[in-house]
């Protein structure tokens, strides 16, 4: 259950994806049409984010090799805690696929098995009037824009 003003981000290490069942089916309207298949008991993980802290950007970059897209998903996890610090430190060793519902209720898949997202986190007490929190960041590059996520 979410606290007021807190929303949930879903994410999973890309190594949890079952490559034997992984099929990139994208519809003509740019929706990923198959549910991400996970190995055995694995499934999406969740992370609480302050509602107004979440942002996503997708910036095209042109190079001699063509266009690629830089994706950045950021947010604030409230309340510094030792257990969370340890978990975030461990998370920085992996790459991820993220599932995000935007402010209009549209679901998006950010990162894929072929182009997973990296992760970093910063902690701050924020001074006397600031937040006691972690600023998290999933980031990566892809040859494609992010996909809508509408598994059948």
Image (cartoon, rainbow, N blue to C red):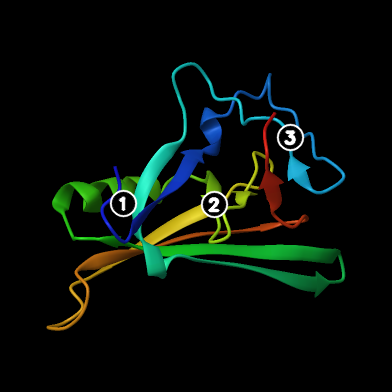
Q: Is disc 2 placed on a helix, strand or loop?
A: strand
Q: Secondary structure at mark 3?
A: loop
Q: Earlier in the sequence, mark 1 or mark 3?
A: 3
> In what quadrant of the picture does the C terminus appear?
top right
Q: Which numbered marker is on residue 101?
A: 2
Q: Furthest residue to the top?
A: 40
x 77%, y 63%: residue: 68
Q: Is residue 110 visible?
A: no
Q: CA distance from mark 1 to mark 3?
A: 33 Å
Q: How many numbered marks have been drawn onto this rendered protein structure?
A: 3
Q: Point out the tag, 2 or 3, that comes first from the N-terminus.
A: 3
78 left or right, relative to 73: left
Q: Is residue 118 above or below residue 94?
A: below
Q: CA distance from mark 2 to mark 3?
A: 16 Å
Q: Nearer the viewer, residue 49 or 141?
A: 49
Of 18 and 54, nearer the camera is 54
Distance Cα–Cα, label 2 vs label 1: 25 Å
| Circle number at residue 33 | 3
Nearest to N terminus: mark 2 or mark 1: 1
């Amino acid at each position: 259950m979410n606290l007021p003003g807190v929303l949930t981000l879903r994410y999973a290490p890309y190594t949890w994806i079952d490559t034997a069942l992984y099929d990139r089916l994208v519809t003509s309207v740019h929706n990923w049409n198959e549910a991400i298949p996970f190995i055995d008991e694995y499934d999406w993980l969740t992370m609480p984010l302050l509602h107004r802290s979440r942002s996503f950007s997708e910036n095209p970059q042109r190079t001699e090799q063509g266009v690629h897209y830089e994706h950045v998903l950021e947010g604030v996890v409230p309340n510094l805690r030792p257990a969370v610090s340890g978990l975030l430190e461990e998370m920085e060793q992996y790459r991820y696929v993220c599932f995000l519902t935007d402010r209009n209720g549209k679901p998006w898949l950010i990162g894929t098995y072929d182009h997973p997202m990296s992760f970093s986190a910063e902690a701050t007490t924020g001074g006397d009037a600031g937040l006691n929190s972690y600023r998290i960041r999933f980031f990566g590059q892809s040859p494609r824009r992010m996909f809508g996520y509408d598994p059948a």
